[in-house]
Amino acid sequence: MPATPDRPEEVNSGLIDVGYLPDEATALVAFLAIKLGKPILVEGPAGVGKTQLAKSLAETLGRELVRLQCYEGLDEAKALYEWNYRKQLLRIQAEAQDTGWQEVQDDIFGEDFLLERPLMTAISSPDPVVLLIDEIDKTDQEFEAMLLELLSDFQISIPELGRIEASTMPLVLLTSNNSRELTEALKRRCLYLWIDYPSLEHELEIVRLHAPELDEKIARRLVEVVAMVRDLDLKKPPSIAESIDWARALLLLGATDIDSKTFNDTMSIIVKHRTDIDIVAERVGVKLDSAEDGSSAASS
Amino acid sequence: MPPPPDKRPSREASRRAALFSEPLANPLDAGLTAHLVEFGEELRGEGVALGTSELLDAFSALPEVAWNEPTLFRETLAATLAKSPEDRAIFDLVFERFFFRATELAALNTGIGEAGSGSDDGEANSEIDIEALREQIARAIAEQNEGALRDLARLAIAAFAQPGEGSGVLGVDVQRIRRSLGLRTDPQGDVPQDDPRAEGLPREGIRRFEQLLRQELERQQIERTSSLPAARPLHELDRALPSGPLQDLASVHRVVTQLKRRLKTQGQEHRGHRRHAHVDIRRTMRASLQTGGVPITLRYRPVRPRRPELFVICDVSTSVTSASVFFLSVMHALHDSFRKMRSFVFIERVSEVTEVFERERDFKAVSEAIARDAGVADISGYTDYGRVWGELLEQIQDQLHPRATVIVLGDARTNGRAPGTDAFAQIAARAGRTYWLNPEPRLYWNYGDSVIDTYAQYCEAYECWTTGQLENFVKILTAPEATRP
């Protein structure tokens, strides 16, 4: 795919080439973000491929991916830049006695003594990068406020050095699990993309793409069961990655059909809470049983 | 600064916009701009917080995409205008309503009518094979074929609804047609194996078809009467509290998820950053080893969000049946957000149900378990507040402390029994804050056997029978300490 696509379809096919099957909205929003130079705020339940979207975009655009994983208590020193205190101390100690104060000060606050953190790396890189700010909802609002300058003007102010402006325009993706409401100011600066669990057909395509050897009939059955499990009120519904894992596991086991026994044996791949396992075993296991009875009755 | 959008009309952009009946030479001319601003106004009217900068974004994004695809146009607007799942839902509804009405209005103005309407309908009617139509529709629903559904919706109306014979209420007509078509979600036996109806149809598909039916009926109505009906506001429908015990729990859950998110956000909002942080000596010393023993970086103790300790006491007697379904699910949601929370239900006696809520994930199981095991009704099944407060005081008085919050959910109707004000006053005095949520409108307070004012001396009483009131209460509950009297 070219570095600057002209049509949303190009983004779409580029993403498919690297193994990511986007829906229409995803490709469109990614295209708009590249065109308009705006950040994308990607929201959706856990495990629908939000982080993977950034990785795949970086791959298909041929850009480097710079990732900032957010967590509670993340601060500027970890995200933007930090002075390399040890190096500065060494510099001061190695200095001959008669060097002037001003000289030393100019020296130790130079770029040699700056430790670049992800946001700084993304801004100062000579080639355009894809910047992924993962799980922005885990940070506090102070950090969000700090991001505003970066997101709208692509520049960072360092008191000692002045303003560092981006030489190239990074493509910024922010992901959020919606665990808290982000500020309006941040949302206003972004394009918004909501990724939901894929439809049956779409997920079937994804599974088929990643486990092509799996029999079509089983694959269809698999995504049906996964959709059924997602409908239950679970602590952690199965993600797309887990459907793929499950497909691969079934392939390894050489399963020919998903009956209640296979399901119970391999259920732990898609359900990962003890209480969830109970619920799923009860609800879905029974359904699979009755489906078998029904089909055997129909065939007899 | 992002580069300014290309002002040259691109090849796609100079195409005729499919959504509008008037051909537009340049899609960004005054006509469309005005339309979009109007659309933005409608979104604001439905409660979407929309800034001018977002509208500007939409304008700069539109020239970048092709216009002949309705979904592209729609998704572009959605990505720039609607910034949360809730906003997106509203956006979709308003989009349908707005552009549907815009098209119809333009059609009225230019006098474009449906070709072949009127006398032809009668003839077309007789030629439609009803059974084949049923099967086709079922198949289109199962395959989620949007275009086919749109066409079939018109056929179905032609087949089942004679013009002028409609009930006048669109919803009734839609349901009548759906029934005559035999569209059901449960498997149907009397059809061939390969027919999608044998497995039962997807609920989503049927709903979509109903929407199309409604739209088409509405379109015909507009054509018949040559005028646009007043636009319906969206939100009244799904904002009211469930009033019957059997009502859809899903709507309750939607409100409760909102509430949960608000609880999470509000805890974070008011954490002072570093202002009250304490230096963690041990970690500072350890960090100073890197700089040769000079403590250059200070390490602080992490600031933990404060969560109040909650005691929730809920009336489950018959007089508040409809409200208690709601309240129980609120309790259910609160349990996810607050670690230190104890729940009680009462009628004549009080019974702790904390464990039930922690054990059961499923709300239905919770309400069943409570109905079965709680043992709160003794003889009469009427609320006995006096006895309840006495028992409750005995159970929790040692655990109450000034940081605890007590929330009572009940209608304060004593059935003529003693209100037990003393015991309640003691509970309120020991707890830091006490709230009373009354599911009755304020108008009915203190009428009959309601003694809410007796209790209101010791606590703050709020009426709570709509989701808006509940949201207000949550705001009060999680508001910062300083603004409280």
Image: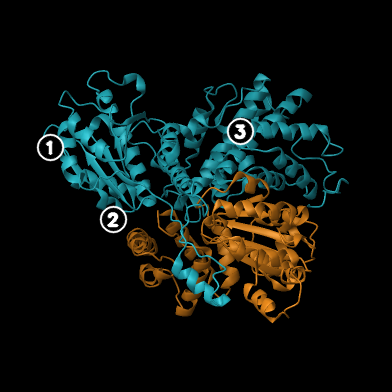
Chain colours: A orange, B cyan
Cα distance between the residues tagged 3 and 1 = 54 Å
Residue under label 1, please give it.
B378
Q: Amino acid at mark 2?
A: Arg
The subunit carrying tag 3 is B
Residue under label 2, please give it.
B359
Instruction: Decide which of tag 2 and tag 1 comes sooner along the chain.
Output: 2
Instruction: Please tell me which residue lies in front, A182 or B186.
Output: A182
Q: Is residue B413 left or right of residue A199?
A: left
Q: Which mark is residue B215?
A: 3
Give the quarter of the image for residue A79. Answer: bottom right
Q: Is residue B304 above or below residue B215?
A: below
Give the quarter of the image for residue B97. Answer: top right
Q: Nearer the viewer's eye, disc 3 or disc 1?
A: 1
The subunit carrying tag 1 is B
Residue at 82%, 32% in the rendered image:
B30
Instruction: Please tell me which residue lies in front, A152 or A247.
Output: A152
Are both tags, 3 and 1, on one chain?
A: yes
The subunit carrying tag 2 is B
Cα distance between the residues tagged 2 and 1 = 25 Å
Label 2, secondary structure: give it.
helix
